[in-house]
Amino acid sequence: MLHVGWIFSLVRSGSSAASYAAAAPWGLSVADELFGPWDRTGPPHSMPKRQAELVRAFRAVGHVLTAEIVGLAHDILRELAERDESGKGWVVCKCPHLMFTPKDFETWFGNTSSQGIEHHQAHLIRNPLRRVNSCYTRGWEHMLNDPYELGVYRTFLHRWQNAETKLRFEDMRSDPSTFFGALYEGWGLEASSADIAKAGEYLASHYHDSSADRRTIEGQVTPRSESHWGVPPEVIDAYLADDEMLGFMHEQGWPTSRGSYEGWLPSKLMRAFRGGRQGASA
């Protein structure tokens, strides 16, 4: 039986780091954005050549799952599984897009054991303003849909809330052992403490600017989205004025004050300005 462990998320939510780290203990293949929107057949992904065919076919039918589309996806996953030398029988599948609904996923992937393949889901979410900032600091704001991505995030938030296996980017950074333990348990993938430690070791030694741009690191590296600030003030205002967003952020223990998302420069300048005035008064 082939098992496929899916990580659903939105872009800039840590799905690359989570997927490749989860695969690392056994050297599992990663189906990196299997359905596209990009051709992943070249390096560094080197997916089977039919992945490009799947991307074109999926686009041609309006990004709707059909028997032909799912059959082609299964063929590609089986081919990826053949590269596994560990005998684990798993492929990790990363999907950082809304792509298809949970209902469609259940319809097409929920009962495929008779075909020799089983699918397992996990959903990964991130502080919405940190996530949007990650796009702006890279000049990727063109990837954001609708006004400030509020509607997209809300849709994924509802999926995350209803998911059986709910994960957070922040926990992956602060407590990788617990994070990957929860991921493997949610998938039903048997993993020892040593396996979980290996996933954490991968995470500590690799930085993913994107799935196509990863590098080896030494020591602690602060994510770009937490050391640079590029989100326009009106985006911060829109999120913090949204009752559902504000409530969710508060529930998760994420900052809900505007000052927490204005970046270091405005705060530094304000402190300098206030300090200068106090000195002059004295």
Image (cartoon, helix red, strand yellow):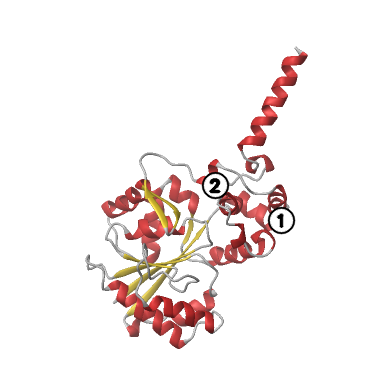
Kind of residue sitting beneath label 2: Ser
In the image, which disc is placed on residue 242? 1
Q: In the figure, is residue 251 to the left or right of 89?
A: right
Identify the mark nearer the N-term, 2 or 1.
Answer: 2
Q: Quadrant of residue 75?
A: bottom left
Q: Circle 1 sits in a helix, a strand or a loop, which is it?
A: loop
Q: Is residue 121 visible?
A: yes
- Residue lying at the far bottom of the rendered structure: 67
Q: Circle 2 sits in a helix, a strand or a loop, which is it?
A: helix
Q: In the figure, is residue 115 to the left or right of 100?
A: left
Q: Quarter of the image containing the N terminus?
A: bottom left
Residue under circle 2?
225
Residue name at image x 49 percent, y 45 percent = 223
Residue 211: percent from the left, percent from the top?
43, 59
Give above or below for 252 relative to 269: below
Residue name at image x 48 percent, y 82 percent = 57
What is the tally of numbered marks visible in this picture?
2
Residue name at image x 27 percent, y 70 percent = 89
